[in-house]
Image (cartoon, rainbow, N blue to C red):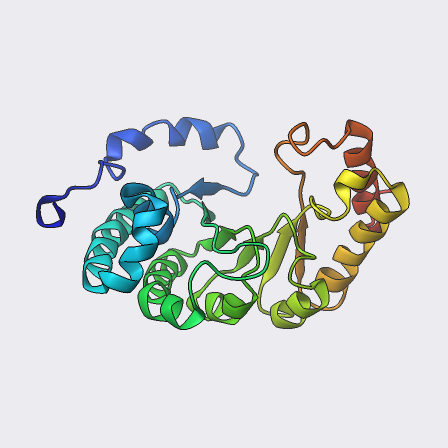
Amino acid sequence: MLDSFEMPPIDDKSRYDHIPDKISKYPDKFRIASLPGMPFAIMRKLRKMENFLADVILEQENVMKLSGIVEEKLCNMIDIYASFDIDGIFFCEDWGTQDRLLISPDLWRKLFKPAYEKICKLAHEHNMFVFMHSCGYIYEILEDLIEAGIDVFQFDQPTLMGMDRISEIFRGRATLFSSVDIQKFLPTGDKELIEKNARDLVEMFFVKGGGFIARDYGDYPTIQVKPEWAQWMRDEFYKVGGYYK
C-alpha cells in the first residue's frame, strides 16, 4: 500500500488555531512545540515494531520512501510552528535497550541520520532549538545526533551510558535535560545518593562548560518514587544552582 499511502493530516493548519491564545497567556516563557517523533518512531508504529525492524534489513528502499513521506509532514509542522514564533521543538524517539541500540550504528547512519539532518536543519533555519528524548543506551550515535543538529538531549537514565562519557561529548556542544536518574538513584529513597547525583549532574554538565536543564520526571507513582524523594532532588538542584541562599 506504500504507493497510495497518505499520512494523517498532522500538518492541517486548522489543528494549530489554539496556539496564539495559548502563548499569549505566557509572553515571557520559552515556547516548545512537539512533534510526534522522528520518522523511526512514526514508521515503527505504522508498521508495528517487529515488522519494521525486519524492514530495515529487508526493505530498505521502501523504508527510505516511507521516511520521505513522514519527513515532509514533520517539516510542514515545523514551518507552521515557526509562524507562531516558537522557540524550540521537542520529540520522543527511543533508540536504545539497556545496553545497546535497537539497530547497528552503521544502519542507523544509513537509514535515519539523513532525516535528522534535514529536519534539524529546517528547525535551525527558523531559529528553533531541537530537543530530543530517548530512553536507553545510545552512546554509539551521540556524536552523530549532535552533528545532525540535536541541541538538547532529554534523558531519564543519564548514568546508563556513563555521565562522565556523555559530558565529554556534550561539552560546549549540547545540553542535558534531566532529572536525577530514575533507575539508579531516585527509586532508592536514599537522600544522600539522590542529592549527590543532583550535584554531579550540575557539576558535569553545567559547571564544566556544557549545559544542564533540571527537570521533574513525569510519572513518579509508576516508578514508586515518593514525593519527598523528588523534593530532595529539587531542593538540591535549587541549592547548587544558586537559587537558595
Q: Looking at the rendering, in which quadrant would you find the C terminus?
A: top right
Q: Residue at x 54, y 43 (%)?
A: 30
Q: Position of residue 14 (x, y in %)?
A: 25, 29
Would residue 29 appear left or right of 41 to someone viewing this image?
right
Instruction: State whether residue 15 is above or below residue 207.
Output: above
Where residue 138 sits, quadrant-wise, is: bottom right
Image coordinates for residue 102, horizontal then vertical, percent: 45, 58
- From this viewpoint, which residue is outermost toward the left? 4
Q: Position of residue 114 (x, y in %)?
A: 32, 66
Frontmost residue, 124 versus 187: 187
Residue at position x 64%, y 62% from top?
161
Q: Quadrant of the N terminus?
A: top left
What's the residue at 35%, 63% (across, down)? 112
Please report the residue visible at 66 percent of the width from the left and 60 percent of the height from the top.
211
* Residue 241 seen from this side: no
Q: Is residue 208 above or below residue 83?
A: below
Tag count in the figure? 0
Evaluate whether residue 178 shows in this view: yes
**Left or right of 22: which side holds 17?**
left
Q: Nearer the viewer, residue 34 or 23?
A: 34
Q: Nearer the viewer, residue 83 or 228?
A: 228
Vertical placement of 237 versus 25: above or below? below
Where residue 144 appears, as percent x and y from the top left, is: 47, 70
